[in-house]
Image (cartoon, rainbow, N blue to C red):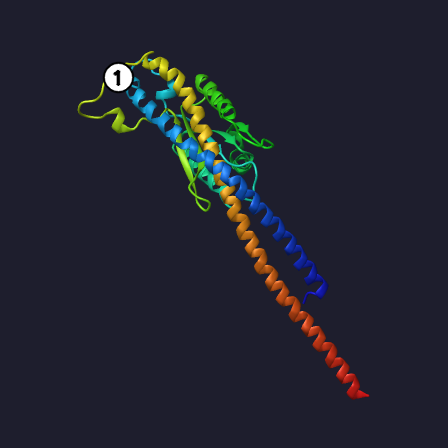
Amino acid sequence: MASLKDLRGRINSVKSTRKITQAMKMVAAAKLRRAQAQAEAARPYAERMEAILALLGSAVASAPGAPPMLVGTGADKVHLLVVVTADRGLAGPFNTNIGRLARARIRALEAEGKQVKLLSVGRKGAAYLKREFASRFVGEVTFAGKKRVDFADAEEIAVQITEMLEEGGFDICTLLYNRFRNVITQIPTEQRLIPAPIPEGVAASEGPQALYEYEPTEEEILGTLLPRNLAVQIYRAILESAAGEQGARMTAMDNATRNAGEMINKLTLNYNRTRQANITKELIEIISGAEAV
């Protein structure tokens, strides 16, 4: 049985931990409001950008000399996976869920005879995947130490991916990230970036269709929109991941705070019982001594 001193030390230690988890929960809640607002504001623009590209791409995809960013290289041998996670932990299963999704995707592709390359955005994803797939990494991006991730940061990642495509470094690029739904739920999401997804209903619709005249040409418009859309989709994923991270951390710290409270109650009960047992033992010894005299 632990001594009273040991129990007091454990109670004080858990109380200190509870104060830390409470503070981290409040900080995460404050950051969540801003991150959620940014993620929700980015969604309509990203979705509208995809719709415009689907409309333009349906007219150009089948033409000779179509941009590789739109139609790909025509092969399906090398896959680039862009894995977006957080730079910090203490967020429950937030980072692990994306790591598991990426690991399952890598194993499925390699089972089909494909080659996989990894580009990680966030330290936790890189740390998780390097245990098993270190040789597949072609780059790592981290925003540790930055108070805010800007669109320019996403553009740098997009430029890196574009350069790899121009050099023939991959055939298909897929983005993996946590999509924010609410404080409790973050959905591991897989989104294809290259070739740009064109819905079948747009690419091969039947019946009369509206005719559009473009100035400049569709090719020139796509030459500008495709790189920008790549940066927009990456930026959206980063914002979604940031909001999901704060929501997951807030939930994790709330659970930790409640668990600490339950542990304090159990330790306090054990402390009182031990103290009462010691007092009872001392009384019995005193009474026995008095009777012996």
For residue 74, side relative to residue 293 (left or right): left
Of the 4 image quadrants, the one containing the N terminus is: bottom right
Q: Quadrant of residue 43?
A: top left
Residue 210: percent from the left, percent from the top? 22, 21
Q: What amino acid type should be assigned to the residue bearing mark 1? A: Tyr
Viewer-nearest residue: 69 or 107: 69
Q: Is residue 28 visible?
A: yes
Residue 288: percent from the left, percent from the top? 76, 84
Viewer-nearest residue: 292 or 43: 43
> For mark 1, what is the residue?
212
Under circle 1, the secondary element is loop
Of the 4 image quadrants, the one containing the C terminus is: bottom right
For residue 40, side relative to residue 92 (left or right): left
Residue 203: percent from the left, percent from the top? 26, 24
Please give the name of the residue rendered at 60% of the width and 47% of the height, measured from the top-left corner: 23
- Residue extending farthest left: 207
